Image (tube, rainbow, N blue to C red):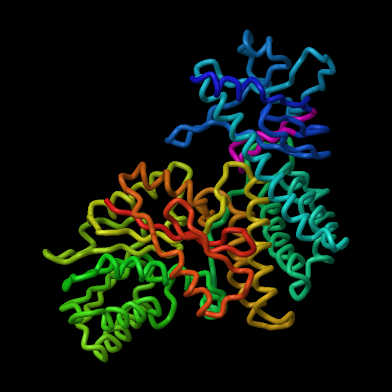
Amino acid sequence: MTDDMANVFLSLEPCNVDQIVYDPLENGLYLTHKQLSYSLNPYTSVLKRNAANVMISTLSNQSGDFKRLRRTPSLGESLGSNSSFYSTDNSSSNCSIPRNDSTNSVNTLSLPSKLHFRDHVWALNQRYLAAEAIEEAAADILNQEEENGEGMKLVQLLITCAEAVACRDKSRASVLLSELRASSLVFGTSFQRVASCFMQGLADRLALVQPRGTVGYVATPAMNKTDIALEKKEEALRLLYEICPHIQFGHFVANCSILEAFEGESFIHVVDLGMSLGLPHGQQWRRLIQNLANRPGPPPHRLRITAVGQNIEKFEIIGDELEAYARTFSINLEFSAVESNLENLKPKDIKVYDGEVLVVNSILQLHCVVKESRGALNSVLQVVHELSPKILVLVEQDSSHNGPFFLGRFMEALHYYSAIFDSLDAMLPKYDTRRAKIEQFYFAEEIKNIVSCEGPARVERHERVDQWRRRMSRAGFQAAPIKMVSQAKQWLAKVNAYEGFTITEEKGCLVLGWKSKPIVAASCWKC
């Protein structure tokens, strides 16, 4: 352990603890205290807020077994005591801890003695990052709403309700939800509309938790969508593609990278994970076919596209349309589909011919297989690595919605989707039903999954590009920098995107943002 890490550990100053609550939904602990005020001196002062709640996650091993944290009333006592936090007396359900007013005493958590010092640092670092995320997101949201008094009240009400839900205070959360329902309007301001989606997510989450003092929780139900709901989401996705540059940006960067990889090649093969979200007509590949036909020299002798996913009937319809479209450009296209979810995909499922150049395309797909154990994602990346593609194009939402703490995740999502709803405000009129469909049938579903679901049911596990960089490196991939920022900016101007949209280059990745807030990031990887 380095001296710097030791200094970080020692400089964290916990506050006195009023109450500590265990929440099985989070596999962690909630600390409720009068004032959260700790900092990593001398670098930064973190968060000061009345009635704040911070969750301290228990450490987990890869098998999913969670180790229980312990509490000691002072630092000196923590060094010498091995007493368990939880009483062995099952008759007592009170988990309150009395406040210690001694100025020489520090209320904190200590980990079991068999854990290493780095585990202490990891737990406290996660605590710091969660508080930092809450502070930054809250500050940005409040800055956006500072000119609107009602907007600021709604922000505070939403955050207070999230804290009540996090503490499993059902009575208080129910009262706050009633107030939110009266203030969150589907056709209101951008923040009123995004608040309505988060309000729905909080209500769903509250229905799953049991009151404080009880052990266990109601399991998150599997998503059971009706055909009507799926049709509405598909329509909303189509509208999002047509109106907003988010997905088009991913397709543009992916196609440019794929064309560069296919330069001078005659036998080429694209493996599309998720078949570009199942958008109708295969728009991404129509543009690729056009570009291949217009490139200098003869067109490729053979283009193969393999779609991977579970909506096999839709894929086959798209495939027939693409094959007919390719014939108009004198390109021989062979389309095939593999009926499998990403977690069960095997290398043998993808037929690769000798002499062909292979690329893999993933548009907003891999975040769905990011789990707590990382096993599912590692399995998918291992399959891709065994295929030995020339490049893997990865396009994902650039936000941290997979953190271990509910409140930090909630605030990150609130900040992210507030920016998206603000962009929709600029692009579509107030009472435009297209905007309502995009928000309520597409983005609202993502928000509710992030806020209300846990375990396998939570699939919207978006992560920042830095985290993807670490994951890809561990899986054996090397970054292939995208050097086309000026070309991407020209494309953005050409598609008539609104002035608030920006494209920046970040360590070899391209990031589409709205008013400096990252929205979608595109990156390329090679084996």
- Name the quadrant containing residue 41: top right
User: Is 489 situated above or below 509?
Assistant: below
- Depicted 87 relative to depicted 506: above or below: above
Q: Residue at x 74, y 73 (%)?
A: 186
Task: Please state if 293 lies on the left or on the right of 26 as rendered.
Answer: left
Locate residue 321 relative to residue 443 in the image: left or right.
left
> Would you say 442 lies left or right of 131 here?
left
Q: Nearer the viewer, residue 422 or 210?
A: 422
Task: Read off the magenta span.
Answer: 18-31
Q: Tell me what residue is drawn at x 32 percent, y 83 percent.
A: 290
Q: In this view, which residue lies farthest toward the top?
A: 80
Give residue 183's quadrant in the image: bottom right
Q: Residue furthest right?
A: 149
- The front one of 474 and 292 is 292
**Percent position (x, y) of residue 62?**
43, 35
Q: Is residue 30 magenta?
A: yes
**Nearest the eye: 508 or 474:** 508
* Residue 238 in view in this figure: no
Relative to 455, 447 lies left or right = right
Identity of the residue drawn at 84% across and 66% down: 182
Q: Position of residue 294 (x, y in %)?
A: 28, 83
Q: Residue at x 72, y 14 (%)?
A: 74
Where residue 202 appears, x then y in whole percent? 70, 55
Residue 211 visible in this rendered orientation of the protein:
yes
Q: Residue furthest bottom?
A: 328
Dominant secondary structure, magenta: strand
Q: Residue furthest front?
A: 486
Magenta stretch: residue 374 in it? no
